Image (cartoon, rainbow, N blue to C red):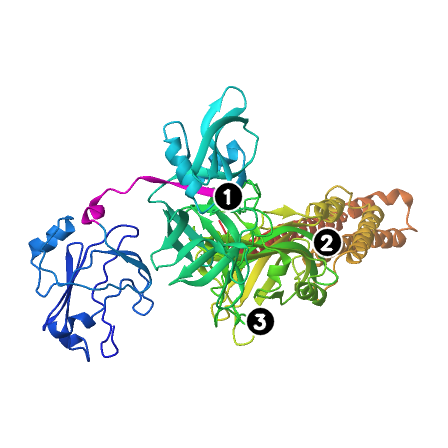
Amino acid sequence: MDEESCPAELSDARLLVRTWQHLCLTVNDSGITLSTNGTSSTKSLTDILACQIGRANIYNVSMVLGSRLKSQSFSGSVVDTRFYGRQLGQKEIADFAGCLPGPQDFLPVPEGEAEGSAAVSNRSLTEMCEQPPKEFLALIVVRNNHREAKGICEALDGRLIDERDNYTLLAEQIADSRDVYDSTVQVWTRELTKGNHGWALSVTRTSEGSVHHTMEYNCHVRFYAVACFIPSDKTIFMKSDAVQEFSLFSHRRQLMLQSEAGEVLSKASCPGNDSVCFVIKRMGKVEKYSVLGSQHQLLGRREWVSSTTNKPFKAALSTCAEGFFTCDEGTCVDLRRRCDGLHDCPDESDEGSNCVMMAELPSTYWNMVCPQARPVVAVDVALDGVREVILEKNEFEAILSINTTWTDHRLLFINLGHSQLVLHEDIVSQLWVPNIEFLNARYQDNLSLRTKSSLQELYTVKALSNGTQGTLNSYEAMKHNGTDVVVSRTIKYLFAFSCQYDFFAFPFDTQTCDMQLHLQPFQGCQPEWNTSSGGIRVYGNRSTISIYSVSELRYTFDYRNRNVLTLKLLFVRRFEAYLLTTFLPCIILCALSQLTLTHFNLDDFTDRITVTLSLLIVIASLFSQMSSSVPSSPVPKCVDFFFFYCILRVSIVFFMHSSIGRSMASGDRQKDELVAVRGPTNALKLAWPETLQEQKQPVSTCRSRAINAAGICVTLLLDVLVTFVFVVWIIRDHYESHNQFSKYNRTE
């Protein structure tokens, strides 16, 4: 193309590799038209700046084939180049496309040139319409026995040579091949004999041609080359960080690979030395190369060197399609079975140190910076048990398992599969992790959370989607963006929490205690709890410790303070032992005091008062003993009121007996005074006054009985009233506590 012309893209039609193409370029005063296999595209001259092309300078026009105008990436053969001084008709173009001779009034062309890896030759047009062979012979230098040779061919979707092939023609192709250098080449055929033997074709190069014959060998014998028939349309993938397609074919007696971009891979001398390499060239310039050594296996993973940067990198030549993994030696295995802990590749390259879970972190990643301004953290809390309730310190100890989950869009995970995987410590140390603490836990416990001492901790990841297939450093992998992967941190620890106990209803008290889980802020961000459905889940069944029944775990959440989650526990004291050791004895003692009113004679003052006083002393001693064992509290407790009533009740009985005694004593004094006045009279005359005294005696007795009956009624009424108030108050206190606790959230 001359200096005054300008390049213009005429067509974006995709040309098939290794097939004949018919191109027809028409240039006139109005524009340029390119016909490619029956399809045409036109470019107006007004769209091509500084390009005024007409018939006068038709010989100054050049055409570039390929997707890159400056690289001139076309490679191959150019045949039967013709220039016409007129525009061809559609039928004439169709004749050319059908491999017919076409019009003969073309201009004479003294010389044809083609830039790039291309050759100009004159061939018959009929070659363009001939069907290409379905397979071609390829020789690969690699040590192999019969089983390995068959596997190499099958990996390329090919086959070993067999008796159906023309061994004479094959021998000539093998002798002419530039892929092997030995004077004698032995390759396995597909035929097997009886036992562990098979046939091999031996080809010897001579100055006059080649000599071949077949021989029988043990199948374990290893040859230095393998001959395969490979399909002509076979595609080979070159996989590094990207995937590039190559077509496999034989060109000039040598096995080659060619990409659509014009890159050609073949076996040649390494740049700068005489070693044998796989070399990738573009326009004759070496771009990449890989030293082969003694094994010239086409497929597999090896180290390459970039000619421009001289930096090594890994790349794999593979036939593995999407959904498969390329082993180091070229075998294909299911990608889902990679990094599952079981070796599937013959060389075990699908497991081991290559099974990394996370790609290299971006250079801008810092684990002290949040993924976003308000990252959302989900949490699962399981109550594994309440170990102890420490009433003296207003504390309780509980074993909690806390699982926090989050996503980080900055990360890229690979090979996660569908199961939950444990993250290694070296990866965890690089990641951003939300920090948690309990606002009402002991300082030492929060310090253990921070320093991870005496703490059971586990980090896991789980993919939420199937991911997308890609390659990283030549290894196929399923890539998962950080937004589709949940990172989990699970800790288990024995925490001690403070709780303000209320002993007013002791021993029928219920205690509601909190555990305030707090997300700590980071530089420039404040994490929040996930309030969506399923974002907060708490677990913990009812249990019982020595003196309390522990409820299920519940929680509350204040939407104004999204970084604090309050867990709730309800402790209900078990009071059965107090009924037996405290309440029942006191009730029995009160009943005994009642019996002194109902079953003791009125004139047995000494027995009545003595028993009552003894009962009062016993109740007082029980009260003193109980007070020393109950939790200390500045407010009176229910049991204090109970003992106070018992003492008050027995004291009332005591006062009743005292009143009865005083009443009986006043009657006795009146009798004594009458006897003292009438003493000097005649004894025979005392009978009448005695009869008068007996008539006065029932007056004091009736008063005593009235006092006794009043005491019985008053004490019974007090018992009924106090019992009613006491029971109703206890039931109401329990109901209110349970009703309030039931309003808190729980996980079904």
Which residue is at a point 57% across and 30% down the rendered structure image? 220
Query: Could you tell me the amino acid type at mark 3?
Result: Met
Residue 64 in picture, x, y percent from top left:
26, 65
Compared to 376, does 577 lie above or below? above
Residue bearing mark 3: 368
Residue at disc 1, secondary structure: strand
Query: Could you tell me the amino acid type at mark 2?
Result: Cys
Instruction: Kindly report which numbered mark, 3 or 1, lies closer to the viewer in this rendering.
Output: 1
Q: Which residues are magenta?
A: 124-141
Q: Residues within 10 Å of mark 1 (few under 14, many from 20)?
A: some
Residue at disc 2, secondary structure: helix
Residue bearing mark 1: 141
Front-most of 222 and 649?
Answer: 222
Residue pushed farthest right? 680
Residue bearing mark 2: 646
Which residue is at a point 89% across and 53% down the rendered structure image? 676
Is 129 inside the magenta-drawn segment?
yes
Q: Name the disc covering residue 703, or none.
A: none
Residue 440 in picture, x, y percent from top left:
64, 66
Cα separation, mark 3 vs mark 2, equals 66 Å
